[in-house]
Image (spheres, grey):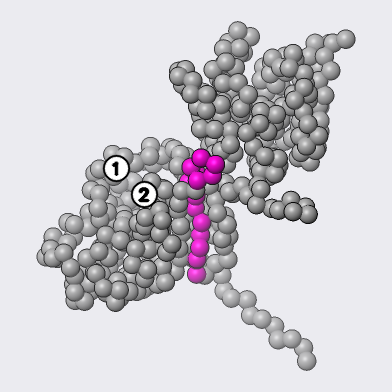
Amino acid sequence: MSVTSEVSEKLQALPEAAAVAVRMKAEHYFDVIRAMLDVFASRKNLDSIYVTSTIPSASIINALEVLEIPLDHIWFVDCISQIMMSPGQKHGHAIYVESPTMLENLMLKVEYLIRKTKDRKNLVILDSINSLAIHNNTKILSEFLHILVNNLRAKESYTIIFSMEEYESEEIRNMLNLVSDETLQVEGEG
Amino acid sequence: MAPREREEPEERERCITGIDGLDNILNGGIPRGNTVLVTGSVGTGKTSLCLEFLVHGAIVGENSLYISVTESADKLLSNIIPYDFFDRKLIKDGRLVFIDLPVIYERLGLEKLEFDFEEVNILITAIGNIVDELAIKRLCIDSITSVCYRLRTQENIRDFILKLGSMLSSRGCTSLLVSEISPAEERYSLYGVEEAIADGVVVTGNLERRGDLLRTLQVVKMRGTMHSRAKYVLDLTTVGVLLVPLLKGGSVPAAGG
């Protein structure tokens, strides 16, 4: 079974408004994104809010275009482009947070997009806990996740938190266990 | 001896601000008729907060009045955030009214730079007449600091705010008075009098944390309701003012430390 099918099937089996930690290897990154945005969100008629602190939204948007995934119901909260001082063009489906350390502003932008897309339920993807952990200490990050996940649950939104196995620490695992309803381990073929 | 039953105080009617986060902080809204000082340094969102309060009022059928002291209403409207919920028809229908205070000064012949006791009364009567005539239920004066500048003495300022608050409250009008302070100020108003007399104090500010500048809001005082006194981070958006709790990570001492 392909990674995309494996992940989308596991997501389908989740209860409504679940908070899920997705543990994966970097090589499965784009397959997981396809499973989330193209398969799961489409089937469930969800608007996706993709929070990126790993790579700029422009790069993800380029990849989605290559994968022929339509952007109509996908929105980005980009916490990395401005800190990189990248002069790239601003995209109409992306809003920017000055730095991944501004966790409150990140929550505010997610809230803003939820209100803007109020006709449909939301899938909020946090990419990734590892890159946020580079910029924030564990205490503030745990507090942030706790508030964000509970807030999203109250709004009946799904929360997906990416974690790259290669960069996981014991602290990150504990944090994810605390806030997630389930942990989805991406095995891949073989 | 059996303990005496405590009488529950009667819940005061609320003026729902329409700003969800603020209504939650205030446990349902501002107690109707309260005079609230909205205080903070420049660029912290005071005017946006007040405008949204008035626009929501106008939408729910409460006539709302914005009295501009330093900036003309036209200029203000040209810089207003393009709220998704704002409709210029509210102005056309007289539900949302903008008045420049210097125009009132001129009509009343109050052209001196310093007002005496009698002129303070004339000004309050004039505002009261406008509130009556237009059936105003929400009012904002932006800024009260500029009005106080003409009153000069603490006695005059105290008298003005007391009379203004009492006049508006008796008409069931909930009001926001904008106060400008410098970022380094340790009190809530320039003259140190306004916050003691107002029924509520909402402080907006800038918080610097590791080089990031966050806009914050804190309700320090609000008579007639239980409320949170925590600090929140705010964002000014086209869907209105959004608020989330300020994260306190790191403020909890580590075990054994």
In the rendered structure, does residue A121 fall within the stretch colored magenta? Answer: no
Residue, x 46% and y 59% (percent of image)? B202
Q: Which residues are magenta?
A: B208-223
Find numbered disc 2 in the image and state the secondary structure of the residue it sits on.
loop
Vertical placement of residue B117 versus A137, above or below: below
Q: Chain letter for mark 2, please.
A: B
Of the pair B97 and A74, the residue shown nearer to us:
A74
Q: Chain letter for mark 1, please.
A: B
Q: Quadrant of the N terminus of chain B?
A: bottom right
Residue identifier under label 1: B77
Left or right: where does residue A11 sit relative to residue B228?
Answer: right
Find numbered disc 1 in the image and state the secondary structure of the residue it sits on.
helix
Residue identifier under label 2: B42
**Residue at the far right in the pictured view:** A190
The type of residue carrying mark 1 is Leu
Residue, x 64% and y 37% (percent of image)? A136
Vertical placement of residue B203 versus B249, above or below: below
Q: Position of residue B226 (x, y in %)?
A: 58, 66
Q: Nearer the viewer, mark 2 or mark 1?
A: 2
Residue, x 69% and y 25% (percent of image)? A44
Query: How would you classify the magenta stretch by its main secondary structure?
Result: strand
Of the pair B130 and B196, the residue shown nearer to us:
B196
Task: Please give the label number shown on residue A47.
Answer: none
Q: Position of residue A114 (x, y in %)?
A: 57, 35
Query: Can you see residue B222?
Result: yes
Answer with the quarter of the image where residue A14 lies: top right
Q: Position of residue B210 (x, y in %)?
A: 54, 41
Q: Earlier in the sequence, mark 2 or mark 1?
A: 2
